[in-house]
Image: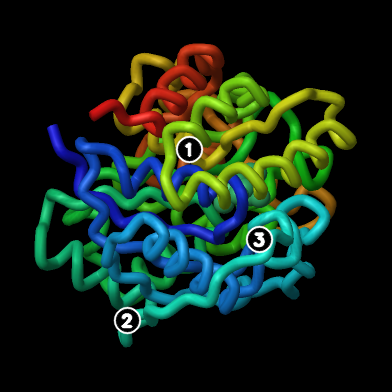
Protein backbone atom coordinates (compact mmCIF):
# COMPACT_ATOMS: atom_id res chain seq x y z
CA UNK A 1 0.00 0.00 0.00
CA UNK A 2 1.27 3.51 -0.78
CA UNK A 3 0.77 6.24 1.82
CA UNK A 4 0.24 9.73 0.41
CA UNK A 5 1.61 12.05 3.05
CA UNK A 6 2.16 15.71 3.84
CA UNK A 7 5.15 16.00 6.15
CA UNK A 8 4.86 18.93 8.59
CA UNK A 9 8.32 19.62 9.96
CA UNK A 10 10.85 21.92 11.68
CA UNK A 11 14.12 20.50 10.34
CA UNK A 12 16.04 19.75 12.69
CA UNK A 13 18.49 16.82 12.80
CA UNK A 14 15.95 14.06 13.44
CA UNK A 15 13.49 15.74 11.06
CA UNK A 16 16.17 15.57 8.34
CA UNK A 17 16.53 11.84 8.82
CA UNK A 18 12.77 11.36 8.64
CA UNK A 19 12.63 13.49 5.50
CA UNK A 20 15.29 11.26 3.94
CA UNK A 21 13.05 8.27 4.65
CA UNK A 22 9.96 10.00 3.26
CA UNK A 23 11.88 10.94 0.10
CA UNK A 24 13.24 7.43 -0.40
CA UNK A 25 10.62 4.93 0.74
CA UNK A 26 8.78 3.16 -2.08
CA UNK A 27 5.57 2.97 -0.05
CA UNK A 28 5.49 6.72 0.64
CA UNK A 29 4.24 9.32 -1.80
CA UNK A 30 5.47 12.65 -0.42
CA UNK A 31 2.88 15.19 -1.59
CA UNK A 32 4.70 18.06 0.05
CA UNK A 33 6.45 19.38 3.11
CA UNK A 34 5.01 22.12 5.29
CA UNK A 35 7.35 23.97 7.60
CA UNK A 36 7.08 25.41 11.08
CA UNK A 37 9.29 27.19 13.59
CA UNK A 38 10.52 24.92 16.39
CA UNK A 39 14.04 23.51 16.22
CA UNK A 40 14.90 26.54 14.07
CA UNK A 41 13.27 29.75 12.83
CA UNK A 42 10.64 29.39 10.11
CA UNK A 43 13.03 30.75 7.45
CA UNK A 44 15.70 28.18 8.32
CA UNK A 45 13.11 25.40 8.49
CA UNK A 46 11.92 26.19 4.97
CA UNK A 47 15.43 26.50 3.60
CA UNK A 48 16.43 23.14 5.15
CA UNK A 49 13.36 21.37 3.76
CA UNK A 50 14.13 22.73 0.28
CA UNK A 51 17.80 21.78 0.58
CA UNK A 52 17.09 18.20 1.68
CA UNK A 53 14.77 17.66 -1.30
CA UNK A 54 17.38 19.20 -3.62
CA UNK A 55 20.11 16.91 -2.29
CA UNK A 56 17.83 13.93 -2.93
CA UNK A 57 17.26 15.32 -6.44
CA UNK A 58 13.51 15.49 -5.99
CA UNK A 59 11.08 18.34 -6.68
CA UNK A 60 8.73 18.31 -3.71
CA UNK A 61 6.49 21.32 -2.95
CA UNK A 62 7.50 23.06 0.29
CA UNK A 63 4.96 25.43 1.89
CA UNK A 64 6.06 27.77 4.65
CA UNK A 65 3.94 27.95 7.79
CA UNK A 66 3.87 29.03 11.42
CA UNK A 67 6.59 31.47 12.49
CA UNK A 68 5.53 31.51 16.13
CA UNK A 69 3.13 29.90 18.60
CA UNK A 70 -0.59 30.75 18.52
CA UNK A 71 -0.70 32.34 21.97
CA UNK A 72 2.46 32.06 24.05
CA UNK A 73 5.72 33.90 23.51
CA UNK A 74 8.17 32.02 21.32
CA UNK A 75 11.19 30.43 22.98
CA UNK A 76 14.55 30.84 21.23
CA UNK A 77 15.41 27.85 18.97
CA UNK A 78 17.50 25.16 20.73
CA UNK A 79 20.82 25.76 18.92
CA UNK A 80 22.65 23.57 21.44
CA UNK A 81 20.61 20.52 20.33
CA UNK A 82 20.21 20.91 16.56
CA UNK A 83 22.79 23.62 15.83
CA UNK A 84 21.90 27.19 14.87
CA UNK A 85 21.23 26.07 11.29
CA UNK A 86 19.21 23.03 12.43
CA UNK A 87 21.73 20.66 10.88
CA UNK A 88 24.51 20.57 13.45
CA UNK A 89 26.14 23.83 12.27
CA UNK A 90 27.71 22.08 9.29
CA UNK A 91 28.49 24.19 6.22
CA UNK A 92 25.51 23.90 3.87
CA UNK A 93 25.19 24.63 0.15
CA UNK A 94 22.85 27.46 -0.92
CA UNK A 95 19.36 26.33 -1.90
CA UNK A 96 18.35 26.91 -5.49
CA UNK A 97 14.60 26.21 -5.23
CA UNK A 98 11.81 28.17 -3.52
CA UNK A 99 8.75 27.56 -1.39
CA UNK A 100 5.34 27.50 -3.08
CA UNK A 101 3.11 30.57 -2.83
CA UNK A 102 0.47 29.00 -0.59
CA UNK A 103 0.95 29.05 3.16
CA UNK A 104 1.33 25.69 4.90
CA UNK A 105 -2.31 25.62 6.14
CA UNK A 106 -3.58 26.54 2.64
CA UNK A 107 -1.44 23.81 1.10
CA UNK A 108 -2.78 21.23 3.56
CA UNK A 109 -6.40 22.24 2.94
CA UNK A 110 -5.97 22.21 -0.85
CA UNK A 111 -4.26 18.83 -0.96
CA UNK A 112 -6.74 17.16 1.37
CA UNK A 113 -9.72 18.55 -0.55
CA UNK A 114 -8.20 17.43 -3.83
CA UNK A 115 -7.93 13.85 -2.52
CA UNK A 116 -10.57 13.35 0.16
CA UNK A 117 -10.01 10.26 2.28
CA UNK A 118 -6.49 9.70 0.95
CA UNK A 119 -4.06 12.09 2.62
CA UNK A 120 -2.09 11.29 5.77
CA UNK A 121 -0.74 14.26 7.75
CA UNK A 122 2.51 13.40 9.51
CA UNK A 123 3.40 16.22 11.91
CA UNK A 124 6.77 16.23 13.66
CA UNK A 125 7.05 19.80 14.90
CA UNK A 126 4.91 22.27 16.87
CA UNK A 127 1.32 21.95 15.63
CA UNK A 128 0.41 25.49 14.49
CA UNK A 129 0.02 24.54 10.82
CA UNK A 130 -2.45 21.75 11.53
CA UNK A 131 -4.38 23.96 13.98
CA UNK A 132 -4.58 26.74 11.36
CA UNK A 133 -5.67 24.26 8.68
CA UNK A 134 -8.50 23.11 10.97
CA UNK A 135 -9.56 26.73 11.38
CA UNK A 136 -9.44 27.30 7.62
CA UNK A 137 -11.51 24.22 6.84
CA UNK A 138 -13.44 22.83 9.83
CA UNK A 139 -14.52 19.85 7.70
CA UNK A 140 -10.90 18.70 7.37
CA UNK A 141 -11.25 15.92 9.99
CA UNK A 142 -13.82 14.14 7.82
CA UNK A 143 -11.54 14.28 4.78
CA UNK A 144 -8.13 13.39 6.17
CA UNK A 145 -7.25 9.70 6.12
CA UNK A 146 -5.00 9.74 9.17
CA UNK A 147 -2.98 12.11 11.34
CA UNK A 148 0.29 10.96 12.92
CA UNK A 149 1.89 13.29 15.44
CA UNK A 150 5.36 12.93 16.90
CA UNK A 151 4.96 14.58 20.24
CA UNK A 152 3.84 14.32 23.80
CA UNK A 153 4.65 12.04 26.67
CA UNK A 154 2.24 10.10 28.84
CA UNK A 155 4.35 8.21 31.38
CA UNK A 156 7.87 9.03 30.27
CA UNK A 157 8.16 12.59 31.57
CA UNK A 158 9.25 15.49 29.42
CA UNK A 159 12.38 16.41 27.50
CA UNK A 160 12.15 20.20 27.76
CA UNK A 161 10.37 20.47 31.12
CA UNK A 162 9.84 17.78 33.75
CA UNK A 163 6.52 16.94 32.07
CA UNK A 164 6.47 18.39 28.54
CA UNK A 165 7.83 17.14 25.23
CA UNK A 166 9.30 19.86 22.94
CA UNK A 167 6.70 19.91 20.14
CA UNK A 168 3.83 20.18 22.63
CA UNK A 169 5.64 22.76 24.78
CA UNK A 170 6.47 24.98 21.78
CA UNK A 171 2.79 25.56 20.99
CA UNK A 172 0.49 23.97 23.58
CA UNK A 173 -2.61 25.88 22.38
CA UNK A 174 -2.21 24.54 18.85
CA UNK A 175 -1.48 21.06 20.21
CA UNK A 176 -4.68 21.09 22.28
CA UNK A 177 -6.75 21.88 19.17
CA UNK A 178 -5.07 19.22 17.05
CA UNK A 179 -5.13 16.47 19.68
CA UNK A 180 -8.81 17.09 20.42
CA UNK A 181 -10.08 17.44 16.83
CA UNK A 182 -12.37 14.67 15.64
CA UNK A 183 -9.94 12.97 13.29
CA UNK A 184 -8.19 9.59 13.41
CA UNK A 185 -4.94 10.49 15.16
CA UNK A 186 -2.01 8.51 16.51
CA UNK A 187 0.39 10.09 18.96
CA UNK A 188 3.96 8.82 18.78
CA UNK A 189 5.57 10.40 21.82
CA UNK A 190 8.54 9.95 24.11
CA UNK A 191 7.06 6.77 25.64
CA UNK A 192 7.91 5.14 22.31
CA UNK A 193 10.73 7.25 20.86
CA UNK A 194 12.92 7.01 23.99
CA UNK A 195 12.92 3.21 23.55
CA UNK A 196 14.73 3.68 20.22
CA UNK A 197 18.42 4.63 20.17
CA UNK A 198 20.24 4.98 16.90
CA UNK A 199 23.84 4.05 17.77
CA UNK A 200 26.96 5.11 15.82
CA UNK A 201 27.32 1.69 14.13
CA UNK A 202 23.78 1.90 12.71
CA UNK A 203 24.44 5.47 11.59
CA UNK A 204 27.57 4.33 9.74
CA UNK A 205 25.46 1.86 7.74
CA UNK A 206 22.98 4.63 6.87
CA UNK A 207 25.69 6.99 5.66
CA UNK A 208 27.18 4.27 3.48
CA UNK A 209 23.76 3.69 1.92
CA UNK A 210 23.07 7.34 1.10
CA UNK A 211 24.31 9.56 -1.69
CA UNK A 212 24.40 13.38 -1.35
CA UNK A 213 22.14 13.35 1.69
CA UNK A 214 24.57 11.06 3.54
CA UNK A 215 27.00 13.82 4.51
CA UNK A 216 24.20 15.97 5.96
CA UNK A 217 22.78 13.05 7.94
CA UNK A 218 26.26 12.11 9.17
CA UNK A 219 27.49 15.53 10.28
CA UNK A 220 24.21 16.62 11.84
CA UNK A 221 23.96 13.28 13.67
CA UNK A 222 27.46 13.81 15.12
CA UNK A 223 26.33 17.12 16.65
CA UNK A 224 23.03 15.68 17.96
CA UNK A 225 24.91 12.69 19.41
CA UNK A 226 27.13 14.99 21.50
CA UNK A 227 23.98 16.55 22.96
CA UNK A 228 22.54 13.11 23.84
CA UNK A 229 25.83 12.02 25.39
CA UNK A 230 25.91 15.10 27.60
CA UNK A 231 22.20 15.38 28.41
CA UNK A 232 21.19 11.73 28.74
CA UNK A 233 24.44 9.80 28.98
CA UNK A 234 23.59 7.57 26.00
CA UNK A 235 25.77 6.85 22.98
CA UNK A 236 23.37 7.52 20.14
CA UNK A 237 20.29 9.57 19.40
CA UNK A 238 16.56 9.01 19.57
CA UNK A 239 15.21 9.27 16.02
CA UNK A 240 11.96 10.84 17.24
CA UNK A 241 10.57 12.04 13.94
CA UNK A 242 11.46 8.92 11.98
CA UNK A 243 9.40 6.97 14.52
CA UNK A 244 6.24 8.67 13.23
CA UNK A 245 6.94 7.19 9.79
CA UNK A 246 7.85 3.83 11.26
CA UNK A 247 4.47 3.77 13.01
CA UNK A 248 2.73 4.50 9.69
CA UNK A 249 4.48 1.64 7.90
CA UNK A 250 5.03 -0.81 10.76
CA UNK A 251 2.41 -0.18 13.48
CA UNK A 252 3.07 -3.69 14.80
CA UNK A 253 6.36 -2.43 16.29
CA UNK A 254 4.47 -0.24 18.80
CA UNK A 255 2.24 -0.87 21.80
CA UNK A 256 -0.75 1.46 21.78
CA UNK A 257 -3.69 2.40 23.93
CA UNK A 258 -6.95 4.13 23.00
CA UNK A 259 -8.11 7.15 24.91
CA UNK A 260 -8.86 10.86 25.00
CA UNK A 261 -6.02 13.37 24.92
CA UNK A 262 -5.65 16.73 26.62
CA UNK A 263 -2.83 19.25 26.58
CA UNK A 264 -2.12 21.59 29.48
CA UNK A 265 -1.81 25.09 28.03
CA UNK A 266 -0.81 27.30 30.99
CA UNK A 267 1.30 27.20 34.12
CA UNK A 268 4.17 25.00 35.23
CA UNK A 269 2.80 21.96 33.39
CA UNK A 270 2.28 23.77 30.04
CA UNK A 271 2.75 21.33 27.18
CA UNK A 272 2.04 18.25 29.27
CA UNK A 273 -0.11 15.65 27.49
CA UNK A 274 -2.69 13.63 29.43
CA UNK A 275 -4.26 10.35 28.33
CA UNK A 276 -7.65 9.38 29.68
CA UNK A 277 -7.92 5.66 28.73
CA UNK A 278 -11.12 4.68 26.97
CA UNK A 279 -12.17 2.10 29.54
CA UNK A 280 -11.62 4.34 32.58
CA UNK A 281 -14.21 6.63 34.15
CA UNK A 282 -13.08 9.71 36.02
CA UNK A 283 -14.99 12.14 38.25
CA UNK A 284 -16.35 14.14 35.32
CA UNK A 285 -16.06 14.43 31.55
CA UNK A 286 -13.35 17.13 31.44
CA UNK A 287 -10.72 14.61 30.33
CA UNK A 288 -12.85 13.05 27.58
CA UNK A 289 -13.08 15.77 24.96
CA UNK A 290 -13.32 14.94 21.25
CA UNK A 291 -12.99 11.44 19.86
CA UNK A 292 -10.69 8.73 21.23
CA UNK A 293 -7.18 8.69 19.82
CA UNK A 294 -4.45 6.06 19.59
CA UNK A 295 -1.39 6.64 21.75
CA UNK A 296 1.93 4.78 21.55
CA UNK A 297 3.03 3.74 25.03
CA UNK A 298 5.98 1.55 24.08
CA UNK A 299 8.03 0.45 21.09
CA UNK A 300 10.25 -2.44 20.09
CA UNK A 301 13.32 -0.17 19.96
CA UNK A 302 15.82 -2.52 18.25
CA UNK A 303 13.27 -3.48 15.58
CA UNK A 304 12.43 0.18 14.94
CA UNK A 305 16.13 1.00 14.52
CA UNK A 306 16.60 -1.96 12.14
CA UNK A 307 13.66 -0.70 10.08
CA UNK A 308 15.12 2.81 9.87
CA UNK A 309 18.54 1.50 8.83
CA UNK A 310 16.96 -0.69 6.17
CA UNK A 311 14.82 2.18 4.86
CA UNK A 312 17.91 4.34 4.47
CA UNK A 313 20.15 1.70 2.91
CA UNK A 314 18.25 0.86 -0.25
CA UNK A 315 19.60 -2.07 -2.25
CA UNK A 316 19.37 -1.87 -6.02
C1 LIG B 1 10.81 16.51 19.00
O1 LIG B 1 11.30 17.83 19.25
C2 LIG B 1 12.19 18.24 18.24
O2 LIG B 1 13.32 18.80 18.80
C3 LIG B 1 12.52 17.00 17.45
O3 LIG B 1 12.74 17.32 16.10
C4 LIG B 1 11.30 16.14 17.61
O4 LIG B 1 10.30 16.50 16.68
C5 LIG B 1 11.30 15.58 20.10
O5 LIG B 1 10.81 16.00 21.33
CA1 LIG C 1 10.86 17.83 14.68
Q: Quick one: label 1 or label 2, which is nearer the N terminus?
A: 2
Q: Quick check: 33 left or right of 52?
A: left
Location of residue 60 in the rendering, given as x and y in whole percent from the top left corner: 28, 65
Query: Residue 176 is drawn in which quadrant?
Result: bottom right
Q: Is residue 105 above or below residue 98?
A: above
Determine the residue positioned at 19% across, 62% down.
112
Q: Is residue 31 left or right of residue 174?
A: left
Front one among 248 and 239: 239
Number of other residues with Cα within 10 Å of mark 2, as a class: few under 14, some 14 to 19, many 20 or more: some
Mark 2 lies on residue: 100
Mark drawn on residue 86: 3
Q: Helix, strand or loop at disc 3?
A: loop
Of 75 and 233, nearer the camera is: 233
Kindly indicate the quadrant of the structure image that contains residue 239.
top right
Q: Nearer the viewer, mark 1 or mark 3?
A: 3
Q: What secondary structure is marked by label 2?
A: loop
Q: Considering the image in quadrants, where does the C terminus appear?
A: top left
Amino acid sequence: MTHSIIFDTDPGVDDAQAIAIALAHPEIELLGMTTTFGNVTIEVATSNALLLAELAEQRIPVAQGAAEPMVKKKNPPPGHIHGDNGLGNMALPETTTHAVEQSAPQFIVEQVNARPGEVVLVAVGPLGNLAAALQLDPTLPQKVKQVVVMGGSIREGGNVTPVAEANMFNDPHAAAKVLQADWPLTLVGLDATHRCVLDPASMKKIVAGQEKLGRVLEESYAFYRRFYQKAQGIDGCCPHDSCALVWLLRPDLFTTRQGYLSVITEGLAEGQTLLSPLEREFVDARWSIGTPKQVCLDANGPAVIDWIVEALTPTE
